[in-house]
Amino acid sequence: MSKTKSKKSDKRNRFKQFSGKQKAIIILLAIAFIFAIIYSVATIIYRTGKTKVVIRVAPNVAVITLNNTRVSNNTTIWVEPGEYTFKATTNSEHLNSYESQITVENTPVYLYATLSAVDDEGREYIQKHRQEYVVVEGLIGNLDNTEGEKIKKEYPILRHLPINNNFYSISYEYDQNNKPIINIKTTDEFIDTTVEKLKTFDDVELADYNIIFHNKSPFSDFTQVSSQDVENYIRSTYKLTSDYKINELKQSGDYYYTFIYKNNSEGDSCGKYRIILKKDANNEWSAVSTPQPILTTYNTPGVDKEIIKLANSY
């Protein structure tokens, strides 16, 4: 008799020695184990290519739909990536409905919402179900903090903002792609002060941000001219008066950069606008973009970031 057959025989003999109750338990455990494996495999197959969506709405009786398909409240589901309309309503005319457009990609989505009151009866209802609201409000708060830290890690300039004082204000908002737009309001007199403040953010690469100065630029009205003389090109293109100065031209590779400014009543330079230029095949100058207090990959597209950084540091 082979060793394999001997082992099987030993197992059968040991099994026969168990009582009827012990045998039943062993069989049930084996069946449960098999079902657990089947469930795990089925779950993996079902979730492949899908994204986790966690839903929690107060009050608990809220009716939830995703693209008009009913889903349970206080649950976790798995859906295909795509665009969805998330709605939460109740049968009560005293509570507002909630609706938002969401994009599901490859990271978990948390759909938390609270339905607000329309009138006093709605406020009374919310008060009676206050604990349900407290739970969801806590989840929303934690999510906001988590998302805020995530965004600030990706865009560290936000850790320094907003700033408001008598000289300038620096704030931010988000564009449609959830990327920050840095809004700056100041006067020409304090443009350089504002730029120097931005440069104190050691953990920030300014060239990576969409930075917008909302004061009126003296260079917004321009007409490109042809000239082989850089000063004539700049003055003629931007219609500069004699009180504007052009600093010494610097070169890096095929690009040239300088800044344009004029002095204030005390004789100090006031409002440096940086500009990057390039010569064409005929040795004529052209500006890569409109002069800006800070050059970025947004307002100076197509230029290597190292060139932009050099111009900003000048």
Image: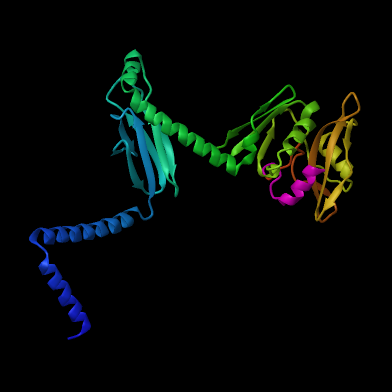
**Which residue does the image show at 29% across and 26% down from the upper left?**
90
Please say whether residue 83 is one of the residues in the magenta stretch. no
Quarter holding residue 97: top left
Q: Residue at x 89, y 23 (%)?
A: 265
Q: Is residue 13 above or below residue 23?
A: below
Q: Which residue: 71% across, 23% down? A: 165
Q: Quadrant of the N terminus?
A: bottom left
Residue 243 x, y percent position in the rendering: 89, 30
Residue 52 % position (x, y): 38, 46
Q: Is residue 301 magenta?
A: yes
Is 190 left, or right, of 299 in this rendering?
A: right
What is the x, y in percent for residue 69?
30, 40
Q: Residue 104, located in which quarter of the rendered image?
A: top left
Left or right side of 307 for 230: right
Figure label count: 0
Q: Which residues are magenta?
A: 298-314
Q: Quadrant of the C terminus?
A: top right
Q: Is residue 37 above or below residue 208?
A: below
Residue 116: where, in percent of width, then height? 38, 22
Is 263 or 30 nearer to us in this picture?
A: 30
